[in-house]
Amino acid sequence: MNPIVLIPARMAATRLPGKPLADICGLPMIVRVLRQAEAAGVGPVAVAAGDGVIVEAVRAAGGRAVLTDPDLPSGSDRIVAALAQIDPLGRHDVVINLQGDIPFVKSEALSAVADLLATYPSCDLSTVMVAEADPADRSNPDVPKVVAAMQPDGRSARALYFTRSVLYGDAPVWLHHGIYGFRRAALERFCAAPPSPLEKRERLEQLRALELGMSIWAAVIDEAPISVDNPADLERARAYARGLT
């Protein structure tokens, strides 16, 4: 495999406008994500930016960024557009889609999605999940869950469904986190298809892949990464960064 890590980012976030350039202890958030991805050593890293100011910030920090159409509907569409500029000959057969709002993503999470694609030839799309830490997560529609068939190793599972609904029973509830590894052909097929009925119902785009018949595998990670979606999350990220210094 020859992976590449792409980080989609745009300024027009509804709940936190200008999020990619939000300062976290002296560094724009997108630069923190970039540096974490580079440190993982999974493959070359670039930002697929929807705005010129993001490109400028990334390049000023010594990173690679390409400008894409700001009107693209999703991060997946943005990375396909970036790939067309970065790798038109298709040398990279695996694409890791790392969201630009996970400023302290661990190397293990990126390695895990790549390893699943290497381990399971039938896997079209890989992702990560973490065991619930708070029972309230079971009924929180803002926390997507994975219904998964766990493998004997206890560290990987075939995803059967993703939902925002309540899950019941004594078994662990697995919470989904949006780090994805795609085989390139699967990514292109996914983005060429329209939003699916289940995707629109649950507001979870990975359901489109399942409705297309793709195989999704999930790796267990031990700690949920901080995801910045609103001002409160941003303050939590800043507090975390202060604890690192």
Image (cartoon, rainbow, N blue to C red):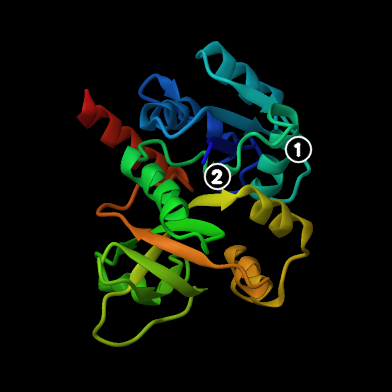
Type of amino acid at the residue the image marks with label 2: Asn
The residue at which mark 2 appears reads as 97
Q: Using the image, tell me which numbered label, if any, was put on residue 208.
A: none
Q: Is residue 178 visible?
A: no
The residue at which mark 1 appears reads as 70
Q: Residues within 10 Å of mark 2 (few under 14, many from 20)?
A: many
Instruction: Quadrant for residue 16, please give it.
Output: top right
Question: At numbered mark 1, what does the secondary structure look like: helix, strand or loop?
Answer: loop
Q: Is residue 182 left or right of residue 171?
A: right
Q: CA distance from mark 1 to mark 2?
A: 17 Å
User: Mark 1 or mark 2, which has the lower sequence index?
Assistant: 1
Residue appearing at x 52%, y 50% in the figure: 181
Relative height, residue 83 to residue 25 (above, below): below
Contact flag, marks 1 and 2 (Cβ < 8 Å): no
Residue appearing at x 74%, y 50% in the figure: 73
Give the percent coordinates (x, y) of residue 186. 65, 56
Give the percent coordinates (x, y) of residue 179. 47, 50
Give the percent coordinates (x, y) of residue 58. 56, 20
- Work out whether residue 167 or residue 17 is closer to the camera in this orientation and state it: 167
Question: At numbered mark 2, what does the secondary structure look like: helix, strand or loop?
Answer: strand
Q: Residues within 10 Å of mark 1 (few under 14, many from 20)?
A: some
Q: Is residue 200 left or right of residue 30?
A: right
- In the rendered view of the protein, which quadrant contains the C terminus? top left
